[in-house]
């Protein structure tokens, strides 16, 4: 039997033996007479021996990022808050967290967790002296072969507006 040229308002008196290959485009008007049975979640009979760890607030320092002290020694983010003298700790944070990349990589130590999600400012533009044109954050990573050179040249001044393109996001 050939399919009809137009859909009908009534169901067929002789349904086909096979289901159709594609689902219908529109839902039926009425719910099914025999609804499907959902699986119930499995519940363990014994509680775990230890509680789960506390939920993470997402505010953490990068575990791999290192930066140079002004003496040239490379240190991790945790160094910023390791001094037992609160005045020296505050001075370290003020001095080293002024660097945009350190601020983004060391969010917990620099206390910058409340900064909005790591996204580039879509409206930010900056001059490209070599061409006389202007660029935006996406331009920094547009050409993979030039990304590192562009990050070096433009992220110092534009990193706060282009943290994603500058590679500052965790």
Image: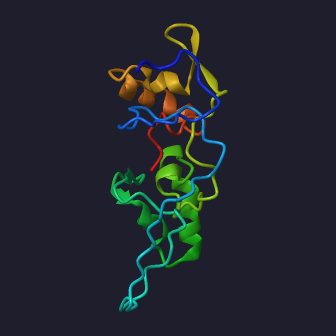
Give the x, y percent position of residue 58. 52, 62
Give the x, y percent position of residue 160. 59, 40
Give the x, y percent position of residue 130. 49, 10
User: Which residue is more in the foreground, 156 or 53?
Assistant: 53
User: Which residue is more in the foreground, 107 or 77?
Assistant: 107
* In the image, residue 118 above or below residue 153: below
Q: Quadrant of residue 9?
A: top right
Please report the residue visible at 58 percent of the width from the left and 18 percent of the height from the top: 6
User: Which residue is more in the foreground, 76 or 116?
Assistant: 116
Describe residue 1's horizontal placement relative to residue 34 as left or right.
left
Please report the residue visible at 60 percent of the width from the left and 40 percent of the height from the top: 27
Q: Residue furthest front?
A: 13
Q: Quadrant of residue 125?
A: top right
Please report the residue visible at 41 percent of the width from the left and 77 percent of the height from the top: 42
**Colour pattern of the rendering:** rainbow
Which quarter of the figure is the N terminus placed in?
Answer: top left
């Amino acid at each position: 039997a050939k399919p009809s040229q137009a859909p009908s308002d009534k169901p067929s008196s002789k349904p086909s033996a096979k289901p159709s290959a594609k689902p219908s485009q529109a839902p039926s008007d009425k719910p099914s007479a025999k609804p499907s049975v959902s699986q119930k979640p499995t519940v363990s009979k014994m509680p775990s021996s230890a509680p789960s760890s506390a939920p993470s607030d997402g505010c953490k320092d990068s575990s791999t990022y290192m930066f140079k002290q002004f003496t040239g020694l490379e240190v991790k983010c945790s160094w910023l808050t390791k001094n037992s003298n609160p005045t020296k700790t505050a001075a370290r944070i003020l001095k080293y967290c002024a660097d945009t990349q350190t601020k983004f990589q060391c969010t917990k130590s620099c206390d910058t967790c409340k900064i909005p999600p790591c996204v580039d400012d879509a409206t930010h533009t900056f001059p490209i002296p070599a061409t006389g044109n202007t660029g935006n954050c996406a331009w920094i990573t547009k050409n993979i072969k030039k990304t590192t050179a562009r990050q070096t040249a433009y992220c110092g001044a534009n990193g706060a507006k282009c943290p994603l393109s500058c590679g500052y996001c965790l």
